[in-house]
Amino acid sequence: QGQLGAATAKLQSCIVVMDSSLDMSSVFSYQSNDEFVPSRSLKNFSLLLSLSALYAPIIILKYIDLLSRLRRSGGSEVAFNKRLAYRVDIFLSLHPYAKPLVLLVGTMLLIGLGGLALYGVTDDSLSDCLWLSWTFVADAGNHANAVGFGPKLVSVSISIGGMLVFAMMLGLVTDSISEKFDSLRKGRSEVIEQSHTLILGWSDKLGSLLNQICIANESLGGGTIVVMAERDKEEMEADIAKMEFDMKGTAVICRSGSPLILADLKKFLRRVQLWF
């Protein structure tokens, strides 16, 4: 009887412990459900915000364009979309760093909106979603690991935007390099020389003048002659190369420009000897 009483006491204590553990688990599950509800609502709000920020400008522009068409009388007023395109063209033309700035702002908007959209369709945190959005923009192949229809759709959209951003950035870099090489080829760059001879203009007597200056510079071990004329740099260099005389250590530099324009003269006037 004593052993039976001890076993009964132990059984009752185990039942009490199990009941308390069940009560605590129910409390924790209730708290987790309460925490999940605002988190889910926040994710839905972020998804709605990203979609609104994407489509709202298009709808607003269409509405303003429709109002401008209704207010026009006789076709004298210019359409709103044409005026907007004109203002954008003027802005990009007047400011040299406008194109890289617009590309940077577009990239940041793509990363931000993509991160909000990913936050709405996945269970990750906002910081992780922003980082994933950046990886999709930087490398279009990272979206292959997405699971589910929503994450796949958002990741593919971000990757397509990233490819467009990369193409525009490549075009800007290519244009800037081409403009620099064209400027060097056309002879528009500045001449950084001192005590050099500057010849303004081009004539048939340039060959004899160059020969005389080369002979005068022979005793000094050579010198530098800059020829500026309203001709193409490559043509002037080709014509000087056809002149059959020894330069005697003197270097001839050709530049395109007008002697009547002060901005062109400032590129070469550094302690020079002028010959007209």
Image (cartoon, rainbow, N blue to C red):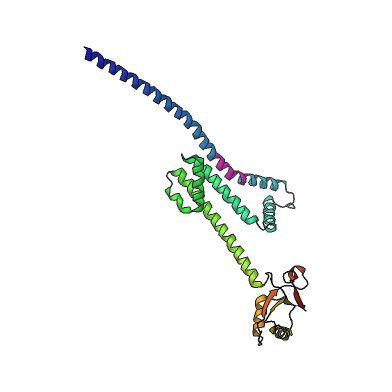
Residue located 45% across and 51% down the image: 142
Residue found at the very far front of the displayed protein: 220
Residue located 75% across and 75% down the image: 272
Q: Quick check: 208 left or right of 11?
A: right
Residue located 52% across and 35% down the image: 42
Assign the magenta stretch its main secondary structure. helix
Residue 22 appears at what percent x and percent y? 37, 23
Image quarter of residue 85:
bottom right
Image quarter of residue 246:
bottom right
Say which of 164 and 82 sits in front.
Answer: 164
Q: Is 20 located above or below residue 178 in the figure?
A: above
Q: Quick check: 229 left or right of 99?
A: right
Residue 11 appears at what percent x and percent y? 28, 18
Q: Is 122 located above or below residue 142 in the figure?
A: above
Say which of 217 and 82 sits in front.
Answer: 217
Q: Looking at the rendering, in which quadrant would you find the N terminus?
A: top left
Residue found at the very far top of the displayed protein: 1
Residue 207 appears at what percent x and percent y? 71, 85
Q: How many marks?
A: 0
Residue 37 appears at what percent x and percent y? 48, 31
Residue numbers of the magenta segment:
48-57
Q: Quick check: 196 left or right of 178?
A: right
Residue located 60% across and 54% down the image: 103
